[in-house]
Amino acid sequence: MIPVQLFLILLASTAPAAPAKPTPSILYTLTINPADLSGFEVEMRISGAPQSIALAMAVHQEYNDRFWRYVKNLRAEVDGKPAPIAREKENAWRILTPRGAATVRYRIEPPPENPTNRAVWHTALRADGASINSTDTFLYLPDFPRASVRVGFDMPETWQFQAELTAGEAASLGMRRARYVSGDATTLLDSPILLGSLRTWSFTVESVPHRVVYWPLPNATPFDTTEFVSSIERFARQAFALFGKAPYPSYTFLIEDGAWGGLEHVGSVSIGAQSRDLAKDPRAYMDEIAHEYFHTWNLVALNPRGPLTASANPPTHTRELWFSEGVTMYYAETLRRRAGIPEGGQTRVRDLEEEIDRFYGNSGNSYLSPERGSWASIDPPDVNTGDYLSNYYTQGRLIAHALDIIIGDSTGGRKGIDDVMRSLYDRFAKKSAFTGVDIEQAADGVCKCNMHRFFEDHVRGAKPIDFNRLLAPLGLRVVLTTEPVADSSGTPYPDLRISAYAPPAGGRMRVRIMDPRTVWVGAGLHTGMEWTSLNRIQIDSFPDFRRAIRSIKLGDVVPVEIVRNGAREQINVRVTGYERTRARIVEIPDATPEQIARRRVWMSAGARSGFGSASEAHRIPKQGATSLAAY
C-alpha cells in the first residue's frame, strides 16, 4: 500500500482522462484448492474503467462481519506491471488505470469456525465443497454498482455449482472452470453460491421455476426429503396466492447442513438446517425457511430503504423494520397455517399467547415504540436505548394481528392485512422506499376508516395494544398472570438477563442491559459500562462473556468488575430468580354466533386474512362494524 498523499500526486500525472461515461466490466475467477482449505484466491480483470478506480468490499444492510479484515496480499497490475494501491478506508482502496484496464488479485482467509455450527452467511470451505457469501468475497467498483460481471470457478471437476445466477460458457482446465454470467455487480453480491456435493430438487409455481439445493455434511443423517421439499413448495404456493405474482423470474433455496440462521436475497435464500433435526421432523426448519423466503417480497422487493443496491457504506437507518420483520413473522405463521403446516401443530390461539408473553416479558416493548426500536437497531445500544431493548419483531407481529382484525371488523370480513400488503407491494415494490405514513394510508384505504390513532399509539408510540378490546369481535379475551420463570420441574431460573457487546470503535467489551427490572441494574450496572471481568472470568470477547454467564447459578453472589470514569470498580450481584407475565386467551362464555363464526375463520388464518374469503364472510351473521374502526 502507498500513502494517499503520494497516490494523489501519481493521479495528477497520469494520462488524459478516460471517456466521460465509462462502462466497466469485470471478469472474476475464484480458485479453490482442496489441498489448502485455509482460504481461496480471487482474480478480477477490469476493463472499460476510468483512469482511477475505487475498489471496495460491500457492507450488508443486515450485518457487518467486516470480512475485509481477511483480505490478504491485495495487489494490482496494469499492462503487466505492478500498480500502486492506496487504502482510502478500512473496506475501500483506489488504483490507477491509465487505459481503463487492470488486473487485481487477492486472497481471502476466513477465520476458523466449527464446520458443524456456523452462521449460514459465513463463507466456508470443506473438502466436499464450499459456501461462498458473495458480499464478503468479491471486491467491486462502488462507483459502478451495475457494472457487467462474469464469474469463473476453478474447482474440482466433481463439484457442482448452484446459485441464482445465469449460466454461461464453460471450459475444462484440469480443475473445472465453470463460467457464469450475472447481469451486474449488485446482483452478484446478493447471490450466495454453493459448490460441491449437492442434492437438488425442483418444482414450479405459476410457471416460475424453483430449486431446493441441500449441501449435506459428509456424515449427514438421512431424512424425508419428499416431505421437506413438499412443505417448501406448499408455502411458496401460499405466497403466490397472496400476492398473485413473484418478484423474481426463478428462485433457489440454498440450504446447508452444519449451519444455522437464514438470510434473504433477491432470487434466493440461504438457510442453515441440520440433517439430524430434519431426520426427526422434515418440517423442523419451516419457520426459518418461511420467514426468510417471505422477505423476498417484504424487505427485498418491498424495502423501506428503497431498491437494493450494493454499498460500501454502513447500513442506513429506517423506522419501518417493525413492518419488514414483524409482519414477515406474522406471515411466516399465517401462510404456514394456510398451507396446512402450522409450527409444532400449535393452534393460532397458542401462537398469539406466546407472542403476548414475549411482549410483556421485556419492559422495553412498552418503552420504545416500534419506529424508535427500528431506528436504533443499527446503533450501539448506549447511543439511543440505554437499559431498554425493544423487540420490534414481536411488536410488528402483534400490530399485524391487530390490523387484520380491525380491518376485518370494519369490512364485514371481506378484507384484511392481505389487502394492505398487496396495496403496498403494487405501489412500492422495486420502485421506491415506503414509510410508516404510507403503511397507515394503505390501511386507511383498505379499511375505509381512520387508523391514525392506532398508528400514533402503537407504531409511533409504545402504548401496549388492548388485546381484550381487540379480540372481543372473536369472542375471546386475554387473562394476564405472573409466575416465576422455572424449568419443567419447577426449579427457578437465575436472572441472567444481561449481555455484552463490542463497541464499533473498538476497545473493551461493554455491558448490555436489556431490561431495567433485572438484579444487575438493581446492583448498579448499566448499559455502556466497560466489562473487566464477570464471576472472576476476564471479559475480552463475547465467547468470554458466554463462558462467564454460564458459570453462574441461582443464589450466587457474583463479583463483577467494571471500569467507571477510568477507574476499576467491583460490584457484587446476588443472583435471584425472576417472574414473567403469562397470557392465556379464553373464550367469552356468552359469545354471539357472529363472534363464534369469526373466531373459527380467524383460527384457520382464513383463505383471505381478516375473517376469511368473501364467500365465508357472507355466511357470518351481520351485526354491523364494532368500534374497532376508531381504535
Image (spheres, grey):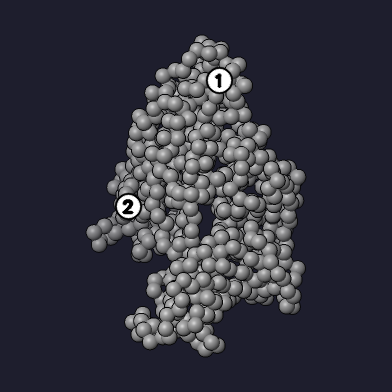
Which residue is the site of mark 1? 598
Which element carries disc 2, helix, strand or loop?
helix
Q: Is residue 421 left or right of residue 12?
A: right
Amino acid on which disc 1 is placed? Arg
Q: Is residue 423 left or right of residue 193?
A: left
Q: Residue at x 46, y 76 (%)?
A: 19
Residues at marks 2 and 1, CA–CA distance in whole angstroms: 45 Å
Compared to residue 128, the image places residue 360 above or below, namely above
Specify few, some or many for label 2: CA neighbours under 10 Å numbering under 14, 14-19, or 20 or more.
some
Q: Position of residue 425 (x, y in %)?
A: 52, 42
Which residue is the site of mark 2? 382
Q: Residue at x 66, y 61 (%)?
A: 166
Name the one closer to the observer, 139 or 143.
143
Residue lying at the far front of the rendered structure: 20
Name the one closer to the observer, 403 or 547.
403
Q: Position of residue 129 (x, y in %)?
A: 68, 65
Amino acid on which disc 2 is placed? Asp
Specify few, some or many for label 1: CA neighbours under 10 Å numbering under 14, 14-19, or 20 or more.
many
Q: Position of residue 64 (x, y in %)?
A: 46, 60
